[in-house]
Image (spheres, rainbow, N blue to C red):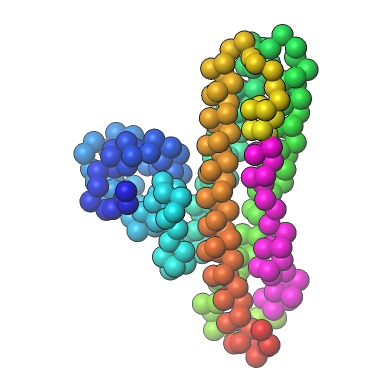
Amino acid sequence: MIVTKDIKMADVVHINHFSLSILDRFGIELGFGNKTVEETCSMYNVDPDFFLEIINAFIDNDYFPKKQLQSFSVKLIIEYLQKTHYYYTQVKVPEIELLIEQMINNCYTQKENISLLKRFFFEYETELKNHILREEKVVFPYIQLIEDAYYSNNISDKIIKNMEDYSIDIFEKEHDNIEEKLFDLKNIIIKYLPQPNNKSICHNLLHELFSLEKDINDHSRIEDKVLVPKIRAMEKEIKKKAGLKS
C-alpha cells in the first residue's frame, strides 16, 4: 500500500508500526488525532512530499523513488540522514546493548557464550560509529560544499582543490557495508548460541537486530542511489563551469 497525503497519519502507523521511528526523525509526535499526513506534516513544518518518499521507501522494500528523492535539496536529504545517525547511536544501539546485558544476567548459565556475543556487538558498534563519524565530518560537509558551488556563479580555486583532494567517487569506493556484520551477529544467535533460559529476551534481541539491519539498508540505499549520482552530476557541472575536463 502506498501512503498518500490524504491518508490519516494514524493509519500510517497501523500499516507499519516501525514507521514510528521515521516519524520521530521528522520530529512528529503521537497525538495527531485524525489529521491526514499532509495536515500533520504542516503542523510540524515538514515537507510532505519528502516525508512521503521516505516513509514509502521504508514501508515497501520494492518502492524506491530515486528520481523523486533526487529532486529534493542535498541539505534536506543530509538533515534526514543525520537524524537517522542520531537514532542509531542514541536509541537503537543502547536498546540492543540493554537486551544483551539482560541475556547475560538472566538467560544463560554459561556466561562465556553470551559474552562472545557482547564482544562481537561492541566491535560492530565501534565500526558503525566510525562509519557515522566519517560521514558527519568528511562526506556531508563535502557534499554541502558541492551543492553550494553548483548553485554559485563563482567557482573558486578552493572548491576545485577540494574536488581534487576528495570526490563522491572516493566515498562510493570507501562506503563499507555495515549491514554484513549485523547479518553475522544474527547468525551467531540463530545457529550457534545455546538455548537461553529466557527465550523472550533472545527473541526481542533478534527482532531489534532485524529492525536495525532493515533500517540501515534503507539508509544506505538513499546514500548510494540518490546522493552519489546527484553529487556526481553536480561535480561534473562544476568542472564544466570551471573549464576543466570531467
Task: Point out the residue furthest to the front here.
Answer: 191
Secondary structure mostly taken by the magenta-highlighted segment of the chain: helix
Above or below: residue 158 compared with residue 40: below
* Near-viewer residue (178 or 164): 178
Quarter the C terminus occupies = bottom right
* Near-viewer residue (38 or 204): 204
Which residue is depicted at the point 68% across and 88% down?
244
Quadrant of the image occupied by residue 65: bottom left
Q: Is residue 118 left or right of residue 205?
A: right
Quadrant of the image occupied by residue 152: bottom right
Which residue is depicted at the point 57% across and 46% down?
216
Task: Please state the horizontal and vertical placement of residue 86, each as a whole percent of the image.
Answer: 56, 42
Q: Is residue 153 magenta?
A: no
Task: Please state the horizontal and vertical placement of residue 243, each as a whole percent of the image.
Answer: 65, 91
Which residue is depicted at the point 78% across and 17% down?
112
Task: Please state the horizontal and vertical placement of residue 171, each as a whole percent of the image.
Answer: 68, 62
Q: Is residue 2 left or right of residue 91?
A: left
Q: Can you see residue 203?
A: yes
Above or below: residue 164 compared with residue 37: below
* Near-viewer residue (88 or 242): 88
User: Magenta part of the protein: which range?
Assistant: 158-184
Above or below: residue 201 compared with residue 68: above
Q: Is residue 181 magenta?
A: yes
Task: Please state the horizontal and vertical placement of residue 194, each as a whole percent of the image.
Answer: 69, 18
Quadrant of the image occupied by residue 196: top right
Q: Can you see residue 72?
A: no
* Near-viewer residue (219 or 153): 219
Which residue is depicted at the point 28% across and 38% down?
10
